[in-house]
Structure formats: C-alpha cells, structure tokens
Amino acid sequence: MRGRWGFAGAAPAAAPAVALLVAVLAALLAGCGSSASPAPSSDGVPQSSMSSSASATATSEFSVQPIAASEATDTTAPVATAAATPAATATPATSSGLYLRYWSVAPIGPVNTFGNAPTVISDGKLLAVPYPSGGDSPLFAPPASRTLTKAAVASIVAEAQSDGLLGKSAALVCPHAADAPMMAGTATEHLVLTVNGSTATLTASCPYQQPAANSKPAAGTWAAFEKLKKLLADPVAWLGSGAGNLTPYDPDRLAVLAEVDDTSGERPLVADWPLAPFASFGVDFAGGRCAVVTGADEAALLPVVKAATESTAFRDDDDALADLVVRAFMPGEPDPCQGS
C-alpha cells in the first residue's frame, strides 16, 4: 500500500534514504507500557479538522547561537543548492524547552507520502511510528513514545548547537564535485528545531553519489545534519538511561485520506465507516477527501481503524466504498490536508 508507515513511504529509487530511515525506527521498536498524552499544536485547528483542539504554551530553557551565513552549505566541495532555503515554520513552545520534527519526502506524489508520520520530540517525549513487521499490515500503527529526562533533552540541544543546526533556516546539500551527475528520485529530509522560541527549518538532500561518513563534520553542513539524525536513530545508545522505555501512544488526532473506490467489484474485507459520508468528509486533496479528525469523531474512528488492515475497505451511509490512509497527527505539525 502507499506511504502509510512513517519513514517507509519512499519509492524504490530512494532506497538508500529509506534504508537509513528504517534504521532510525528500528531503535524505537523494543518496548510497551502505558500511554502518554500528546502536546497539542499551537497553530490552531486545521481548516480540514473534524473537531476542535486546544493550544499549548510553555517556557524554554536553552540559549541559541545562529548558524553563520558561511556555514549554510558544506564548504568541503562546490555545492549546488537543490532548492530554495525553506521558510521558517511556526511550532509550539514546549515545557521541555525543545521541539523537534523530522520527516523525509521522496518525489512520488502526495497520495503516496500522506501516510508518512514525522518523528517528533515535544514536551520531553520522543514520538515515532514503528515500521511494520510484515504480513497483512494493520491500517493504522500508533506511534511509540519515549520519555526523555531533562539531561537528555539538554544533550540533544547541545549536540544540535555543536552541529550548527540551531537559530537559522538553511537548505543543506551534500558535498560533490561541480560536474557530478544528479541522481533522480532521491528524498529530501526535513528538520524543524525550536529552542528558546527560535525556530530553524532545515532541509538536507544528496542527489549525488553518497559521500563517505564524516564523524567530525563542519558545523551547519549536510554532514552535520546527518550526524544528528544518526544519533537520534539509537537514543538509548546515545542518551543511556535518559531515554526511557517505549510505551504505546494513542494520539488525540488522526490524519485521514479517503480514496473513494468507483469500481463495482466485491471487496473481501469491508468495515462500516462511522463518520459523515465520504462526499462531505473533510476537503478535496489529491483526488480524495482529507481531514484531521479530532474530538468525538476521533474517539469513534480510532478503534475502527485499529481493527482494520491495509486490505480493508470502508462503506459509508450512502453505500460508497473507500480505501483509507490513516496516521497519527503529531504535535506541532501543519495540516497535511492543505499541502499539494
């Protein structure tokens, strides 16, 4: 099925990036326990929401030094910037003093990447969606959560500061020769970091032959971005007891894309759709209907999608059938139904 699993939505052409991202999630798969409460987004209720949600404010604890202008690209070789520097993104302040959101997008279209939930650090919790173990995968996989100690959060902030990734937005490209050929289908990684009220919105891309790993990269470079990402791939190895055990995390909002099935053929697995008919559900998006579902609607839908598999179709009160892509709507992320 298309792009439903956090970091697993990339096309085969982006396999190197996907393999690394799957490794990021592998460290998050070893535990279970009680659920944790999510931190709500500060950007208000998305236009496509099916219900309302509160905002959150909090204090911050860390100082930030901006990236110097000369550090925005890797200077070890000529660099061709693949995209314009991204604009800053509004993100919530959190009680831990750190907000982080990471995701990767391959050029395979919005429908195929809609299910890619970002990894988030918010209010002292690391949230990520585990990779499926195979077989007929469930339609919805809830994120797993690790509680981070204040010392662990401070270590992440210090590393990001040392890596030159705080305080300024930049588009980072891997080092390459001036005449190096570009590779099609490579993913672009995204990172939003908010510390002490200052937000950096970074992208990292390498549409060239992958350079050798660098354990001591220059600050503010693509290699520094990759270093931080790899450290976060195994939080226990990096942060020790500062990264708590994994616990299940039931989100209070779901991002849902319904693709109406116009065929008249029989479907082996059909479940009842508990919300408004698909024709009036959410907003138009990529040929389907899209909404961020909250409140009573989310409470009604969550157990239904938890019991479904990727093969399940849903029938509404108008007898229309639809396939669903469903994922957790993470704290602080923008409305996925407003993109293109």
Image (spheres, rainbow, N blue to C red):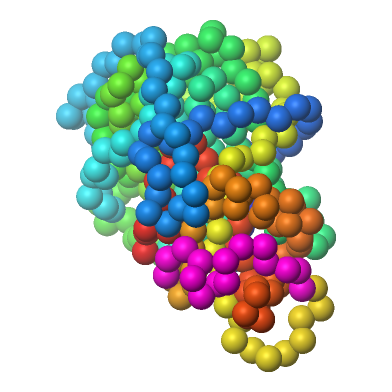
Height in image: 134 above or below 102? below
In this view, the residue in front, 322 or 239, is 322
* Residue occupying image coordinates x 67% and y 52%: 300
Does the stretch in magenta take in 274?
A: yes
Height in image: 149 above or below 140? above
Residue 79, quarter of the rendered image: top left
Residues in magenta, as a range: 270-284
Quarter of the rendering occupied by the N terminus? bottom right
In this view, the residue in front, 274 or 139, is 274
* Residue occupying image coordinates x 67% and y 67%: 273
* Residue occupying image coordinates x 25% and y 29%: 168
Height in image: 92 above or below 183? above
In this view, the residue in front, 284 or 336, is 284
* Residue occupying image coordinates x 41% and y 32%: 55
**Image position, residue 82 (x, y; %):** 28, 53
In this view, the residue in front, 15 or 313, is 313
**Image position, residue 272 (x, y; %):** 73, 68
**Image position, residue 209 (x, y; %):** 43, 52
